[in-house]
Amino acid sequence: MLKVRGLTKRYGGTEVVRGVDLHVRRGECFGLLGPNGAGKTTTLRLLLGLIEPDSGSIELAGIAVPKRARAARMKVGVVPQMDNLDPDFSVRENLLAYGRYFGMARSAIAARVPGLLEFAGLASKADAQIAQLSGGMKRRLTLARALVHDPDILFLDEPTTGLDPQARHLIWQGLRRLLNEGKTIVLTTHFMDEAERLADRLVILDHGRVVAEGAPRALIESHIEPAVVEVFGEGLADWTHARAAGLCQRFETVGETLFCYTDSPDTVIGALKQTPALRYLHRPSNLEDVFLKLTGRDLRD
């Protein structure tokens, strides 16, 4: 559904996208992850033909981009990072108006609306104004709107940012349903648990380059120790100086917490029990640990 080779984009003297290769298979959820400034937004705009690359090739839904970007976008549904629903229209009218942008007959759109409202859990809100909807309802409506023209592939830009856990889980449920129906999804998110739950494969971008690619579990197994013991409390600095190097395969101190990465967590925990003033959290390693190892813990603006 998406083939990208050697994609580059410069702004002035800065190369924002630096030789990116991507391959997204039909029917999979593909994650595009990276810290702020990594090149994700520019990459998305390139893939949709909204800006032109300096070099490289893009084939979206079998169509060359940007040469035939308009034709390609007819096969694509987009959920933007910020909701851009029309506040002057009702829930139903937003769907009807959006379908017209794709040249659909009014009768064809009307036939799809009930199913889309049901999918979004908004059947009872069909005549509500946008201002009457909660944040979760607006995101679900934006997702339903992206499906009006029955696209082959969906681009979701941080679809659950700002939502409470209940709303996030409803969105996830809807996305799994779409995947089960054979849709293809390209997902950007800052929630590593979201990527780990939904993505079949993903890439991590940093400074415009792909720094890792693979299935979430495979990336965790290949890039990080299997267990993490987070240690905090009074006397942490002394314990770190005396014991951390001998007990942890790798460790990092961030603020008042020591992250001990290890394949022998029981040994670490046994040593910690000899220092009651310290507290700890033992957990399996996850995609966020991989992300932070590869891209660093420094804040990005």
Image: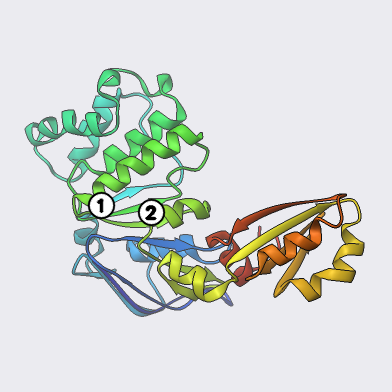
Residue 279 visible in the shown view = yes
Q: CA distance from mark 1 to mark 2?
A: 9 Å
Q: Identify the image quadrant of residue 254.
A: bottom right
* Residue in the image at 84% along x and 70% along y: 243
Three-letter code, disc 1: Leu
Camera-nearest residue between 259 and 60: 259
Q: At which x and y percent is residue 8? A: 44, 77
Number of residues whose C-alpha sits closer than 10 Å to that of mark 1, classed few (under 14), some (14–19) or many (20 or more) = some
Camera-nearest residue between 113 and 17: 113
Q: At which x and y percent is residue 171? A: 37, 40
* Residue in the image at 63% along x and 69% along y: 293
Q: Which residue is mark 2?
A: 198
**Residues at circles 1 and 2 in contact by the CB criterion of under 8 Å:** yes
Secondary element type, mark 2: helix
* Residue in the image at 35% along x and 24% along y: 88
Q: At which x and y percent is residue 122? A: 29, 25
> What label does residue 273 carry, if any?
none
Q: Which residue is mark 1?
A: 179
